[in-house]
Image (cartoon, helix red, strand yellow):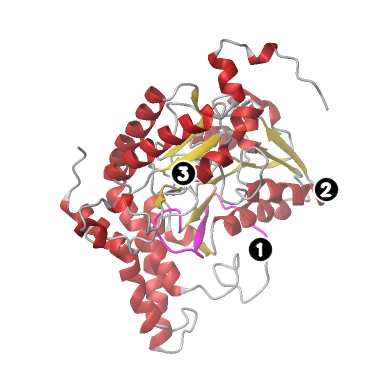
Amino acid sequence: MLVLRPAALRVMRGLLLFQGRSLSGAAQQQGKSSVDDSSLRPLYMDVQATTPLDPRVLDSMLPYLVHYYGNPHSRTHAYGWESESAMEKARQQVASLIGADPREIIFTSGATESNNIAIKGVARFYKSRKKHIITTQTEHKCVLDSCRALEAEGFRVTYLPVKKNGIIDLKDLKNAIQPDTSLISVMTVNNEIGVIQPVSDIGEICSSHKIFFHTDAAQAVGKIPLDVNSMKIDLMSISGHKIYGPKGVGAIYVRRRPRVRVEPIQSGGGQERGLRSGTVPTPLAVGLGAACELAQQEMEYDHKRVSILADRLVTRIMSEIPDVVLNGDPMHRYPGCVNLSFAYVEGESLLMALKDVALSSGSACTSASLEPSYVLRAIGADEDLAHSSIRFGIGRFTTEEEVDYTVNKCIQHVKRLREMSPLWEMVQDGIDLKSIKWTQH
């Protein structure tokens, strides 16, 4: 059994109480495990979409929601000074997590806005001399859409393919560089399959060619060690709600030396070094800062716990269910993001069957679509396997009991759905499905 340190157990219990899912509730009094009580909400295993708010983060925010409500940009009275001081402390906490100078941290509404500022802002500022951008086919949709918007403005964009393990080929990256390339944008940890790109190597390539390097680190910050200077990162996007902070706040790191020039994408009062106009929401900034500080303190412990639980989930599923594929590189990955394809099972049907567990079949931003994941298609997954994928998210507050419950339910429903599948029956009879010529109607 996995042993949690007392502090983590106290925090976890507080979180479960906060969510209305206390393990000491009525279900337990009746001698039942809370995860077996159908009257409760589903277990949460979708932390790539969003993480629960850490109760300690909420505690840090409350005073600024009730008592210290001044505008942080008001310089003429104590209300403004109090909020400004809290905002600057939060800026320091964010900077410390990634090895940056606090003056290089710009508060935003989240990673989507940060990505837009980085990509559109750099491209437009240098457009008189440089009109080419490089990214990958597996980036988050907001990065891809930002690049498509720039293409409509006359920029050229190279969308690099990835290898079957989801990682880019550095030779392809070098070959794609052109004399007027201004920016290379590659995410650190993929939000669907969890692979970690060789960020340090990409940074070296960008630095040697005098090209700015942006990385969408929404799924990486606070989960794996990052240092913007040693990795030669020029711009980095950060999200609050991916690291147990509040929704509606994020940040962008913009290097000061050598300076990265960015054209603002919105007009206003010139806050945040003129790069992001608008009043900074002090409670949200404080929450982001607290989340970053906690992540820095507990990263090693969290990573170890998450790794153990992820190994438990993957090992049991793949040992008890045949024809399961782990999508993405098995080694160079963040363990808390597990993407599995269950052959001969429709992913949407499996999600509906697993109604007691909150899971997804891909990015939360595109989960309403019935189309197979473009990330899985980019790594060369067969159409059927792309349609049968499930993403399991394991985080700070996931328990061993929850993992076991999820695995048991998964095994049960995959077997049941396969029993209803004529394709699975044919495979069991030794028929090679690729040899069949299907009749078109």
Check the image and report above or below for 105 versus 143: below
Q: Residue at x 37, y 59 (%)?
A: 39
- The quadrant holding residue 332 is top left
Badge number at residue 240 = none
| Residue segment shown in magenta | 241-263
Indicate the position of residue 438 as horizontal and vertical percent values.
75, 19
Asked whether 214 falls inside the magenta stretch, the response is no
Taking the view exactly as shown, the residue that stands out farthest to the left is 6
Label 2: element kind: loop
Q: Residue at x 29, y 54 (%)?
A: 34
Mark 3 vs 2, N-terminal side: 2
Q: Tag on residue 354?
A: 3
Name the residue nearer the viewer: 200 or 31: 31
Q: CA distance from mark 3 to mark 1?
A: 44 Å
The relative height of residue 51 versus residue 184 in the rendered view (above or below) is below
Nearest the camera: 422 or 371?
422
Q: Nearer the viewer, residue 425 or 160?
A: 425
**Quadrant in which the C terminus appears:** top right
Q: Which mark is residue 154?
A: 2
Q: Which residue is mark 1?
A: 264
Q: Separation of disc 2 and disc 1 at Cα? A: 19 Å
